[in-house]
Image (cartoon, rainbow, N blue to C red):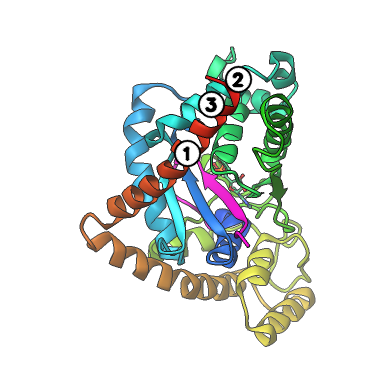
Amino acid sequence: MQRKVILTGDRPTGPLHLGHYVGSIVNRLKYQGEYETYIIIADLHTLTTKPYLENISKISVNVREMVLDYLACGINPEKVNIYLQSAIPELLELNLILSMIVMVNRLQRIPSIKDMSIAAGLTEVPYGLLGYPVLMSADILMVKSNLVPVGRDNEAHVELTRELARKFNYLYGENFFPIPEAIFTDSQALVGIYGKTKMSKSLGNAIFLSDDEETLRKKVMSMFTDPKRVRADMPGEVDGNPVFIYHDLFNSNIDELYELKTRYKKGTIGDVEVKKRLFGVLNQFLMPIRERREFFKSKKGYVDEVIFEGTSKTRKVAVEVVKNAKNLMGI
Ligand code: ADP
Ligand code: TRP
């Protein structure tokens, strides 16, 4: 039996943070080896809202930093194909083919397009941004992916992919493309260090996987806690308190967790102490990640090799799929 194919990926817009770790990396580590796994570095998708040179010059740095983050977390390139979207020209053929069978008003109804243009401060929507979900569909169908783990913000894109796969199959060949399924993490998006909004690199509230010890200490000590608690001897709220959300996720010492929560609720421990303990926990968590990152960084040319290998393997698949799709269409 052929293994199921799984495709995930990120836009290389900056370093990965703890939100990415709990929201997607954990799952990738779980699935690698079990499925035929691809990780796309979606550099073309970053151009949909930022096509200017200043951004473009950052992309190649971000690509390498992101791959270092993957490797540092334990993503194993022996088990996973990590590939660069822009290095696969066949993808653009498939993108064009799909653009013939998708209607403009269908794309205009997808809320994320508007959200992305507002977030990027655009007053008009570029053709490429309207086509964001079509390009993503081409990514997914090009490797005939069965499963697509994504955040809820990408749900509508996978829904469109399903429609396009069905439409292509109906027009040109029954069962050519599998109908992919989105997988969502159960957990809610991880909140940023100042609470309220999700952790995001653009909001300045993120702890990056590559943060050094001092940066981490400063960030943790500046975290928000229970806003109603103004003195350390007042009882405090644990639920929804960012410091405890992080303790819950990263502190595996159940007894310590229980002690901290009980004392916090009674008002017998200060915010500074709970944060210091959190710093210890996160530092322990990030230490091996930092060490592996340094190790891979010091191996000259290794990251480029990983990308080259993964892209070469993926391109072979792409050539075959696009050739067969065109054959079915008679072109
Ligand atoms: P950012 O908001 O930092 O720019 P991205 O837009 O690059 O993050 O996020 C890409 C994907 O990473 C999202 O679709 C989601 O799956 C995951 N992700 C990002 N931030 C978080 C978070 N705070 N909690 C959980 N998952 C997240
Ligand atoms: N749109 C995804 C994001 O929000 C990135 C992405 C592009 C992707 N193509 C993909 C994810 C294919 C999964 C599968 O960052």
- What amino acid is at disc 1? Glu
Query: Considering depth in this image, is 260 or 329 the residue closer to the camera?
Result: 329
Q: Position of residue 173 (x, y in %)?
A: 68, 31
Q: Amino acid at mark 2?
A: Ser
Farthest residue, direction left: 300
Q: Which residue is mark 1?
A: 320
Mark 3–mark 2 Cα distance, whole angstroms, equals 14 Å
Total numbered labels: 3
In the image, the segment drawn in magenta is: 1-18
Direction from residue 107 to residue 193 in the image, left or right: left
Q: Is residue 200 visible?
A: yes
Which amino acid does the dot numbered 3 rest on? Lys
Q: Main secondary structure of the magenta part?
A: loop
Q: Earlier in the sequence, mark 1 or mark 2?
A: 2
| Residue 99, numbered circle | 2
Mark toward the start of the polypeptide (1 vs 3): 1
Q: Nearer the viewer, residue 275 or 291?
A: 291
Q: Are marks 1 and 2 in contact (CB under 8 Å)?
A: no
Mark positioned earlier in the residue sequence (3 or 2)? 2
Residue 201, x across and y down, in percent: 51, 44
Q: Nearer the viewer, residue 232 or 36?
A: 36
Q: Is 316 rendered above or below residue 78? A: above
Does the magenta segment cover residue 258? no
Q: Which numbered marker is on residue 326? A: 3
Q: Is residue 3 magenta?
A: yes
Quadrant in which ligand 2 is drawn: top right
Q: Is residue 68 above or below residue 286?
A: above
Which residue reaches farthest bottom?
255
Q: Residues within 10 Å of mark 2 (few under 14, many from 20)?
A: some
Q: Residue at x 36, y 29 (%)?
A: 56
Q: Residue 91 placed where, x, y %?
A: 48, 31
